[in-house]
Each structure stands twice: as structure tokens, then as C-alpha cells.
Image (cartoon, rainbow, N blue to C red):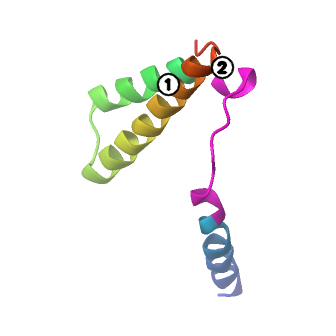
């Protein structure tokens, strides 16, 4: 019981900080974005549940924004 309460409290404490993440383009952060996009696209072609599909679509949107940000700063995304 204590473990589950502790775990839930950590989840609620860390959730707001995860939502405030701001992507900063850099050589390290931009490396491999295209590969991650391709990986998500292949997962979507393989089939998914409704919930999983929404998560994949949101992740894909974020990666595409990051890719555009990286390209505008001149970093490679491959």
C-alpha cells in the first residue's frame, strides 16, 4: 500500500515538470530525429489501439516540430 501511494505521489510531482520541457536544438539533440520519426511511422503501419495511436500521433507531431527547429538552425537530423 505504501509503495503504491509513494509511486502515485512521485507521478503527480514529476508530471508538471515533464510538460514544461522545451526542446533546444543542438548537434546532440538533433541527431537521430529522422530515424525516430521513421520508427514511429513503421509502428503506425503495423497497427495499434486507439490509445496507442493517439500517443504515437502526438509523439510524431513533437518530433516533426523538433526536426523543423533543427533544420532551421542548420543541424543534421539523420
Q: Quadrant of the C terminus?
A: top right
Q: Which residue is mark 1?
A: 68
Q: Compared with residue 49, is residue 78 higher up or lower down, i.e. above or below?
A: above
Look at 64% across and 23% down and name the residue there.
30
Residue 25 location in percent, x, y? 66, 29
Q: Compared with residue 1, is residue 63 higher up or lower down, i.e. above or below?
A: above
**Is 26 covered by the magenta stretch?**
yes
Look at 70% across and 80% down and name the residue there.
6
Sequence-wise, the earlier of marks 1 and 2 is: 2
Q: Read off the magenta span.
A: 17-30
Q: Is 41 or 28 nearer to us in this picture?
A: 28
The count of marks equals 2
Q: Compared with residue 77, is residue 26 higher up or lower down, i.e. above or below?
A: below
Residue 22 location in percent, x, y? 63, 47
Look at 66% across and 19% down and name the residue there.
31
Query: Where, by quadrant of the figure, is residue 15 drawn?
Result: bottom right
> What SS does tag 1 mark?
helix
Q: Which residue is mark 2?
A: 31
Q: Is 10 or 64 nearer to us in this picture?
A: 64
Amino acid at each position: 500500500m505504501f509503495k503504491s501511494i509513494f509511486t502515485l505521489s512521485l507521478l503527480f510531482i514529476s508530471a508538471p515538470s515533464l510538460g514544461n520541457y522545451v526542446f533546444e536544438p543542438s548537434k546532440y539533440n538533433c541527431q537521430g530525429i529522422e530515424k525516430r520519426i521513421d520508427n514511429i511511422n513503421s509502428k503506425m503501419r503495423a497497427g495499434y489501439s486507439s490509445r496507442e495511436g493517439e500517443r504515437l500521433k502526438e509523439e510524431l507531431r513533437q518530433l516533426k516540430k523538433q526536426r523543423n527547429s533543427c533544420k532551421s538552425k542548420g543541424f543534421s537530423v539523420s
